[in-house]
Amino acid sequence: MIKQLAADRIYRGRLAPSPTGYLHLGHARTFWIAQQRAQEVGGTLVLRNEDLDRVRCKKEFVEAMIEDLHWFGFLWQEGPDCGGPFGPYNQSARFALYRAALEQLERGGFIYPCICSRKDILDALSAPHEGDDEPIYPGTCRSNRQSEIGNRKFSWRFRVPDGEAISFIDGHFGPQRFVAGKDFGDFVVWRHDDVPAYQFAVVVDDAAMQITEVVRGADLLKSAARQLLLYRALGLQPPVFYHCELMADERGVRIAKRHDPLSLRRLRERGETPEALRRGFVS
């Protein structure tokens, strides 16, 4: 088990939305749990704007995000609108930190340049890939060196320790165990378009912002295993994790940003109140 050592630290939680659309009721429930857990222990809540997607992130969604969160009743002590000691709180302004961490992984031999496209990976797999999670990488570029690939575009991929069981205790779901190379494979930490990948950026940011507990949706349980490997490779202290049940619509379909009628903005326009919407929220 990769140890999580956050129990003796002053509580610091975070809300980390991505401004690629309007926040929906599922976001609100997960964030509300995060806020409650911070408030119960007198901790600090941080708002981080995860705006690394240059194509999908829009200024109007950032403005709406902050407005809708305030309307719903969220109170954070650090963030892009109020500052704080661990800023900047917009990921797009934190590239120097990401590049330094990437160089550390390269020096340690934890990453390698990968020239494969998603189609290349799917074509190389012996079985079809299903689901939202990324396919297990077949290791095509594991022996690559940057000096050998010339001017070709490439991603940086993290080399997982095949066969190692990554275990942790989730605050909601209990004991978790994922096997590297079986449940997930080598994963991208820096994309070919020169943007840090989600798994990598959140580890760097959560460590730098001294986050002690990460509260987020259950769809990211397996991501915790990947991220624990990154914490270890970077010599960083990991947080503990609390993954929440995902919210579904009346048809049982997981709520996503495409569910415009369930966005906080639309619910507000229809005259719904935060108090009524929060009724029934449970951790």
Image (cartoon, grey):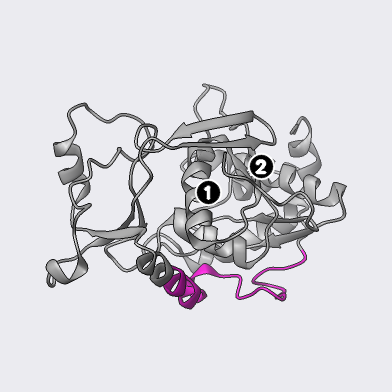
* Residue 42 painted magenta: no
Q: Is residue 121 above or below residue 158?
A: above
Q: Is residue 152 left or right of residue 194?
A: left
The residue labelled by disc 1 is 228
Q: Residue furthest top?
A: 251
Q: 208 and 47: which one is in front? A: 208
Q: 34 and 116: which one is in front? A: 116
Near mark 2 (Cα within 10 A), the count class, few <14, some 14-19 or many ≥20, is many
* Residue 85 painted magenta: yes
Q: CA distance from mark 1 to mark 2?
A: 21 Å
Near mark 1 (Cα within 10 A), the count class, few <14, some 14-19 or many ≥20, is many
Q: Main secondary structure of the magenta part?
A: loop
x then y, percent, for residue 196: 40, 63
> Callout 2: helix, strand or loop?
helix
Q: Is residue 234 left or right of residue 139?
A: right
- Image point (33%, 47%), residue name: 186
x then y, percent, for residue 260: 51, 43
Q: Is residue 58 left or right of residue 38?
A: left
Magenta segment? 77-101
Q: 276 and 16: which one is in front? A: 16
Judge whether residue 64 can be spotted in this image.
no
> Callout 1: helix, strand or loop?
helix
Dot placed on the residue nearer the N-terminal end, 1 or 2: 2
- Give the quarter of the figure containing the N terminus: top right
x then y, percent, for residue 272: 72, 41
Q: Which mark is residue 30?
A: 2
Quarter assignment of residue 24: top right
Judge whether residue 208 can be spotted in this image.
yes
